[in-house]
Image (spheres, rainbow, N blue to C red):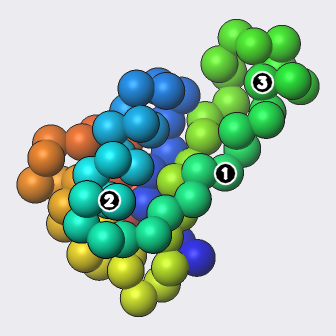
Amino acid sequence: MKDILRTTDPTAIAFCTALLRAEDIDCFVLDVHMSILEGGIGLFPRRVVVADRDAFRARAVLRDNDVDDIVPA
C-alpha cells in the first residue's frame, strides 16, 4: 500500500476517494478514528492509500483534478 494523499481536510478526502473510485482504483482511508485521541479538532492528518500497482495512476488522476496534498512518490 502506498500513501497518495495526506490531509486534515475531510472534503478533500471525500473528493479524492470519489475520483479514485470513479476510475476503478481501490482506495482506503487510514487514521479515521484518530479524532477520538485528538478530541475532534482535526489535528492529525488522514491518509488515503492505494495498492502499489495503482499508485502512479492514482497520483495522475489527483494531479489532473488539481488536488493538493498529494504525497510525492
Residue 59 visible in image: no
Sort mark 3 into few (<14), some (14-19) or many (20+) by Cα contacts within 10 Å: some
Type of amino acid under label 1: Leu
Type of amino acid under label 2: Leu
Type of amino acid under label 3: Ser
Separation of residues labelled 2 and 3 (CA atoms): 24 Å
**Residue occupied by mark 3:** 35
Residue at the (70%, 11%) spot, across then down: 41
Residue 22 visible in image: yes
**Residue occupied by mark 2:** 20
Sort mark 2 into few (<14), some (14-19) or many (20+) by Cα contacts within 10 Å: some
Residue at the (29%, 77%) spot, across then down: 56
Side (left or right) of 4 relative to 41: left
Considering only order in the chain, which callout, 2 or 1, is on the residue closer to the N terminus? 2
Sort mark 1 into few (<14), some (14-19) or many (20+) by Cα contacts within 10 Å: some
Answer with the quarter of the image where residue 14 lies. Answer: top left
Q: Secondary structure at mark 1?
A: strand
Percent position (x, y) of residue 61?
Answer: 19, 61
Side (left or right) of 4 relative to 2: left
Farthest left residue? 64
- In the figure, 10 relative to 65: above or below? above
Considering only order in the chain, which callout, 3 or 1, is on the residue closer to the N terminus? 1
Residue at the (79%, 33%) spot, across then down: 34
Farthest bottom residue? 53
Separation of residues labelled 1 and 3 (CA atoms): 12 Å
Percent position (x, y) of residue 71?
Answer: 41, 56
Residue at the (24%, 66%) spot, across then down: 23
**Residue occupied by mark 1:** 30
- In the rendered image, which quarter contains the N terminus? bottom right
- In the figure, 46 relative to 24: above or below? above
Percent position (x, y) of residue 54?
Answer: 37, 80
Separation of residues labelled 1 and 2 (CA atoms): 15 Å
